[in-house]
Image (cartoon, grey):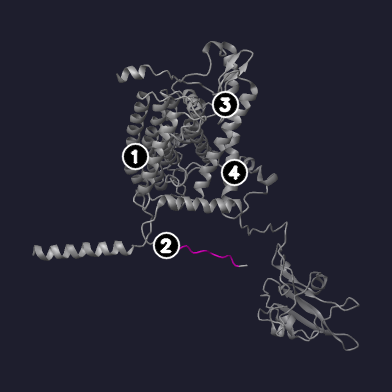
Amino acid sequence: MILATMASDPVVYGTFYDPAVAVTALPWLLFTILKMVIVFTVLMVGVAMLTLAERKISAWIQDRIGPNRTGYGGLLQPAADGLKNIMKEETYPDAAYTPLFILAPMLSFIPSLITFAVIPFAAPLSTRWGIVEMSVANVPIGFLYILAISSLGVYGIVLAGWSSNNKYSLLGGLRSSAQMISYEISMGMAAVSVLLLSGNVSLQAIVQQQQGMGWNVFPLLIGFFIFCVASFAETNRLPFDMPEAESELIAGYHTEYSAMKFSMFFIAEYSNMVTASALMVTLFFGGWDIPGTQWDNLPPWTFLKFALTLAFFVAKLLFFLFLYMWIRWTLPRFRYDQLMSLGWKVLLPLSLAYIVITGGAVLALDMLQVPRSVQWFGISPFWAALGVLNLVLAVLLFVLLDRGRIISPAYSRLSPIQIARLRAMSAGRSLAASQGD
Amino acid sequence: MTIQVKVLARPVADASYVRAMLSGMALTFKHMMNPHKKTEQYPDVKWALSPRWRGTHRMLTDETGKAKCVACGLCPQICPANCIKLVPGEDEEGNRYPLVYEIDEFRCIFCGYCQEVCPEEAIHVGRHYENSEYSREGFVYDLERLTAQTHPVCEMWDPADPKGE
């Protein structure tokens, strides 16, 4: 009976247009090359500008001014930094294992760039030769591709740490592998809740599902929370920057690197940040969807539509990038045991339980024939029901998270109640000991 | 211009990480929107010096352009850093004047005693601080260089008006 209900479900998310009208053959090849070049260039320039944005935002948060000498307001600072890094000497430590030492930055750099290839960044564009999909590669297994490739980046870090033959580097590499493994699980689990709603791992289908129903951030609020925390850990950003940990490990895995090889780790970190932000936007914030209108997800695919959806995508992306920086300059680093206990004792059970709850709720709502499409006041009942469930769960979760039960701060004085409890405990213990004698 | 440091109270009981994080983020956002900037853009914008600033020396001159110094020898006598070199001379009318008057700005501690002790109000410490040189010898200012200085001189502390009002 359940199967029958599922089969009768009319909602199937897929592509936005008939594959027959897509560009083919030579124009397809040319358009793909063009998209590759443009996305690569924009990503590289964006990463360069992000380093400047990071320095500016950190300066403002710390009541400083930030770089303002090169170019207007310091706009040429990334160019100056790049030039400096190219001109500097490449050092090769005597004790390092040179082949892997050279290979490691590339291993870290390349996966961080190619993960962006499957992100849909705008509405399709109709051209004379057919409809052009606005992602470099419209892979039907987009999300699995991202999970697979982004976890390759850790090899670069681990190999850099090992091949440097330096205790700090090795510790950084070890920490990063432990951290990546711990948080990748909860990241994937949190994303499964999105897949339960979309019924498809293609990122285009996920965007389409959100356009029809509303952004996933509300019906999957806790999933978003877990995904957000895990992706901060995945990108090695504060408060999870254990692999680098300047104050403990002297920059960790890239202690021994100089010049452009160091710069490549830096670029990898920032492009990982861009990809993680793009993923959060795509999975939970509707991708290139313009909120409050259906105009953007229906043909004709004009240039105006392309430009507007692109602008919305970039705006959402920038918000998440800003969030990354804002959190970096607010929160201190976790202790290593806190990091591990958050990953394994909190996020993993939480995400597992969340999959069960979401799966059950989606099944129940589908069985009750709750419509997924927008019904009243521009709200889909399916979306609203799941959202209310999540709000209730979130309130429960954050009341539980509260009071320091999950992550205790490094320092807190004992309250009178705790002292009384400890005294009672020790009194009871001495009493039991005296009775035992 | 001391910066006020706000010392936050430590939490008594187990603190909530979530709430602490949110309040921390609110604080940093507030600072980002409205930074309390203290940075001075030094080479572009110069620091406003106090009228009592004691910096590079300056020898004042009379109407004829000659140094006011009468080579009485009080300033080398009082100088705690022993950085003033004075060789007195006398002209045919019996007026004393400095044959050699050198101040080693590198040794000087800028206490301003020379200005306080000078009976002719000739030697002054000045409101000026940019005196970098390429060699140690460059810091020894001779009479010609001391008279050629143009910066405003220090207003010494007046016991009758301790706050400079």
Q: Which mark is on residue B10?
A: 2
Up the image or down, A82 lies above or below A152; here it is below
Helix, strand or loop under label 4: helix
How many angstroms separate mark 4 from mark 1 (CA)?
34 Å
How many other residues sit within 10 Å of disc 1, few (<14), some (14-19) or many (≥20)? some
Question: What distance separates the C-alpha of mark 3 from that of mark 4?
Answer: 24 Å
Say what amino acid the circle numbered 4 marks.
Ala
Residue at 79 percent across and 69 percent down: it is: B151
Read off the chain for label 3.
A
Between discs 4 and 1, the one toward the N terminus: 4
Residue kind at label 1, given as amino acid type: Leu
Q: What residue type is labelled 3?
A: Ala
Same chain for labels 1 and 2? Say yes or no: no
Q: What element carries label 1?
A: helix
Please state if A135 lies on the left or on the right of B65 as rendered: left
Q: Which span is picked out in magenta?
A: B2-9
